[in-house]
Amino acid sequence: RDLNGTERSKLAYTNKEEEVKALFVSAGVTFPPAEMLWRVFKAEDELEVWASDKVGGALKPIATYQICAQSGVPGPKRQEGDLQVPEGFYTIDYFNNTSAFYLSMRVSYPNESDKVLGRKPLGHSIMVHGDCVSIGCVAISDERIQELWVMAKRMDQKKRIVQAHLFPG
């Protein structure tokens, strides 16, 4: 944990870039892909990665990751402090390599639906991160968050969006 952010990010690439590339080769998709979708299934504690070689093309399954921690009860996030993991359609819109939770990537919560259905303050900074603890976020093991970091950062470097769909629990 004493690594600085640059070291954490470099370690993710050193440890996982070849493994990530192999996942895409196995699925028959180039890396980085033209499109990527993360599907979070709260009830199943799973995050699936899907991708396509072309925009609008059929998405293929790449990998499934076990969620090691999430907080709250079944149902969507409606207000700051409710400890809920959101439900809906988002993007990954920010990367934090100096996170208290190893590496983290922000989900674009709140979306328009959250703004209509929620109560103010809505909250913010919902992340997919390492460290296996959660107060409204999706936590993945540090080892596996490195793979997701490499995938999402390569998309970001190519100015491509990672969609994140979070389904009910």
Image (cartoon, rainbow, N blue to C red):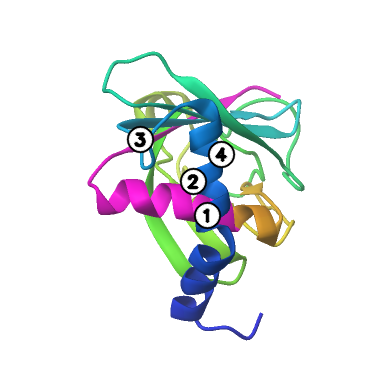
From what the image shows, is residue 153 above or below residue 56?
Answer: below
- Dot 2 amino acid type: Lys
Which SS class for mark 1? helix
Q: Position of residue 104 (x, y in %)?
A: 52, 59
Residue at label 3?
33
Quarter of the image with the C terminus in it: top right
Does 81 sit left or right of 50 as displayed? right
For label 1, the crowd category at 10 Å Cα-Cα, with few meaning under 14, some 14 to 19 and many 20 or more, is few
Q: Is residue 154 magenta?
A: yes
Write down the region rendered in magenta: 146-169
Q: Is 123 in front, or is 99?
A: 99
Q: State which tag comes first along the sequence, 3 or 4.
A: 4
For label 3, the crowd category at 10 Å Cα-Cα, with few meaning under 14, some 14 to 19 and many 20 or more, is some
Q: Is 52 in front, or is 137?
A: 52
Q: Which mark is residue 23?
A: 4
From what the image shows, is residue 128 above or below residue 12?
Answer: above
Q: Which mark is residue 18?
A: 1
- Dot 4 amino acid type: Leu
Which SS class for mark 4? helix
For label 4, the crowd category at 10 Å Cα-Cα, with few meaning under 14, some 14 to 19 and many 20 or more, is some
Residue 111: image quadrant is top left
Quote the CA–CA distance across marks 3 and 4.
12 Å
- Dot 3 amino acid type: Pro
